[in-house]
Amino acid sequence: MRSSNPVFSRRGFSRDNAAGFNAQQPQAGGPAVGTSPYAEGATNPYATNPYAQDTQLGAPPQARGNVMTIDDVVSRTAMTLGTVVVTAALSWVLLPVDQSNIAKSYGIAIGAALVAFVLAMVQSFKRKASPAIILAYAAFEGVFLGVISSAVSTYISPGVVAQAVLGTMAVFAGVLIAYKMRWIRVTRRFYGFVMAAAIGFILLMAVNALFSLFDGAGDGLGFRSGGLGILFGVIGIILGACFLALDFKQVEDGVTYGAPREESWLAAFGLTLTLVWIYLEMLRLLSILQGDD
């Protein structure tokens, strides 16, 4: 099972092979050593653990302290999200969006967004997690979010940013509870549906952005304003919630399989990407609702 998150789609915890870790073959009469009952595709036989060591080849057992734990994921995610929050707060204060500074602030925000995108792509295609790249991505992403949030707060509604933050936290908590209670089942069918919906959503938003370049009002096909804007805002948040469920599945598999500890940085990176998506969709939706009042 691979996540829709670009980090996990390239380096999913359930990948077939991992460098330095060889899966053992199933033994007759029982599940293989290093297999998991939670692995996708297991019927009963168990699916092979991609992180299991091949003791038949004489490989030394992996030290327990070198495997990923939930605490590792939580601490790395806190560091990454903390960097986003701190740089967002600084850019809010240091890059005002008043009439005399708005062009400069927007220019810096767009530049920061482009740098963050490039860093995200670089990390997504790297074979190993790079904490420096991940934290740099978080810093530049925070600059972009700070300016955009300040603009929305200044020109639409002073309270909309706090509402978007609370809404993002509520979505995260709700999906986590639903996942832990097994109300959400991450299966191949679920994954396929989310991927198809996400591709369609992104393509529609790209077409809308393209048309907005030739539209004097800047509304494009109207997917980001009015009734359609509200509908697509809700769809975007629902997709973000689905991404979270896929990410939780990847983290659960990584801990279950005994993934290398450095993989916790990839988990933190992926969760940060998803939470940024949800926050932006929440902010956009609330901006439309506030603007219609």
Image: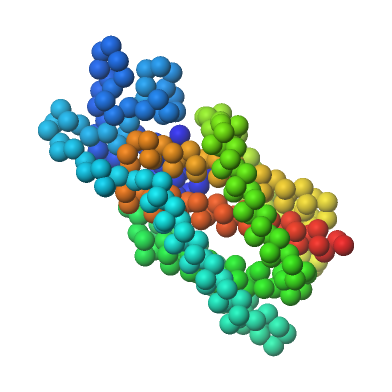
Q: Classify the position of the N terminus by image quarter.
A: top left
Q: Position of residue 240 (x, y in %)?
A: 61, 47
Q: Residue at x 26, y 13 (%)?
A: 28
Residue 197 occupies quadrant = top right
Q: Position of residue 7 (x, y in %)?
A: 45, 49
Q: Classify the position of the C terminus by image quarter.
A: bottom right
* Position above or below: 181 against 158: above
Q: Position of residue 19 (x, y in %)?
A: 26, 42
Q: Residue furthest top?
A: 29
Residue 152 occupies quadrant = bottom right
Q: Residue furthest left?
A: 58
Left or right, 36 with reference to 291: left
Left or right, 197 with reference to 270: right
Q: Residue furthest right?
A: 293
* Position above or below: 213 against 273: below
Q: Residue at x 49, y 64 (%)?
A: 82
Closest to the observer, 65 or 132 = 65
Q: Is residue 214 visible?
A: no
Left or right, 255 with reference to 51: right
Left or right, 239 with reference to 13: right
Q: How is the image coloured?
A: rainbow
Residue 144 occupies quadrant = bottom right
User: How many numbered marks does the figure carry?
Assistant: 0
Closest to the observer, 110 or 159 = 159
Q: Position of residue 35 (x, y in %)?
A: 32, 27
Q: Is residue 235 visible?
A: yes
* Position above or below: 201 against 269: above
Q: Residue at x 60, y 37 (%)?
A: 178
Q: Residue at x 77, y 69 (%)?
A: 157
